[in-house]
Image: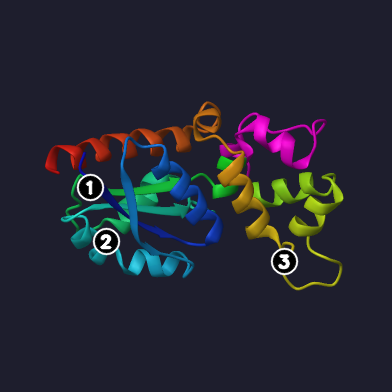
């Protein structure tokens, strides 16, 4: 079976881990190369022409956060303005941040922060999913809390082990299929990826 190649462009380490997890569940074999990461949203948007050109040769998955924009369609229209994307280009938006996708797997989240926490039924509708996750982490087991929650007086909005701890949890415990049952934006991302991956199979 021919290898299907996917480039992955993300804002930060956590988004990269989520992107890799989504690609890993596609029918394979899948090769993720290259990875273009951790330079923020402005970099991703500025390179859209490059991603479009790259998608003529292979799959390209770009993950970004909606943040405070009105809706994903506004972002997609802005980023793709003047471009003619191929079916191999998958630009997907986490509503409102990738943490909403993390929060959507209630089973795995309870294993991370504790079995008695009250989890949001509609994480995509949270105004700030990351802050919601950090609030839950204040009641997590000590080793998890120390990684996720910033120490008093620290400048960062999160603990020093935030990305490492959540990335390992995404790899080992988080289920895209369970999370997609609650998060509409994740469900759309998975559907779009499957469609695009099928196009790669046709052209292999």
Vertical placement of 14 versus 101: above or below?
Answer: below
Residue 31 on image: x %, y %: 32, 51
Which quadrant of the figure contains the C terminus? top left
Q: Secondary structure at mark 3?
A: loop
| Marks 3 and 1 close (CB-CB < 8 Å) | no
- Where does label 2 land, which residue? 51
Assess whether residue 108 is covered by the magenta stretch: yes
Measuring from the top left, give residue 6's x and y in whole percent: 30, 52
Q: Which contiguous range is marked in magenta?
A: 103-128
| Foreground residue among 201 and 135 | 201
Q: Residue furthest front?
A: 1
Query: What residue does disc 3 label?
Result: 160
Q: Quadrant of residue 116?
A: top right
Q: Nearer the viewer, mark 3 or mark 2?
A: 3
Alpha carbon of mark 3 to alpha carbon of mark 1: how far? 36 Å
Q: Earlier in the sequence, mark 3 or mark 2?
A: 2
The numbered mark at residue 88 is 1
Rendered residue at 52%/26% (across/down): 181
| Horizontal side of residue 42 vs 130, given as left or right | left
* Element type at mark 1: loop
Confirm whether the magenta stretch covers residue 116: yes
Give me the C-alpha separation between circle 1 and circle 2. 10 Å
In the image, 87 versus 70, the foreground residue is 87
């Amino acid at each position: 079976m021919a290898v299907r190649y996917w480039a992955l462009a993300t804002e930060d380490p956590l988004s990269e881990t989520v992107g890799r997890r989504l690609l890993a569940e596609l029918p394979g074999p899948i090769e993720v190369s290259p990875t273009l990461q951790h330079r923020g949203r402005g970099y991703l948007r500025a390179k859209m022409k490059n991603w479009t050109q790259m998608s003529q040769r292979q799959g390209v998955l770009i993950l970004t956060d909606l943040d405070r924009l009105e809706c994903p369609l506004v972002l997609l229209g802005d980023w793709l303005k003047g471009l003619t994307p191929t079916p191999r280009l998958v630009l997907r938006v986490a509503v409102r941040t990738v943490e909403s996708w993390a929060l959507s797997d209630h089973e795995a989240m309870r294993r991370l922060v504790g079995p008695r926490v009250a989890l949001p039924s509609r994480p995509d509708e949270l105004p700030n999913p990351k802050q919601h996750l950090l609030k839950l982490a204040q009641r997590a087991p000590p080793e998890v809390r120390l990684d996720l929650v910033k120490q008093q007086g620290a400048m960062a909005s999160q603990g020093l082990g935030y990305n490492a701890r959540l990335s390992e949890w995404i790899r080992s415990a988080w289920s895209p299929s369970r999370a997609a049952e609650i998060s509409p934006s994740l469900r759309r991302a998975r559907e779009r990826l499957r469609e695009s991956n099928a196009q790669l199979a046709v052209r292999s």
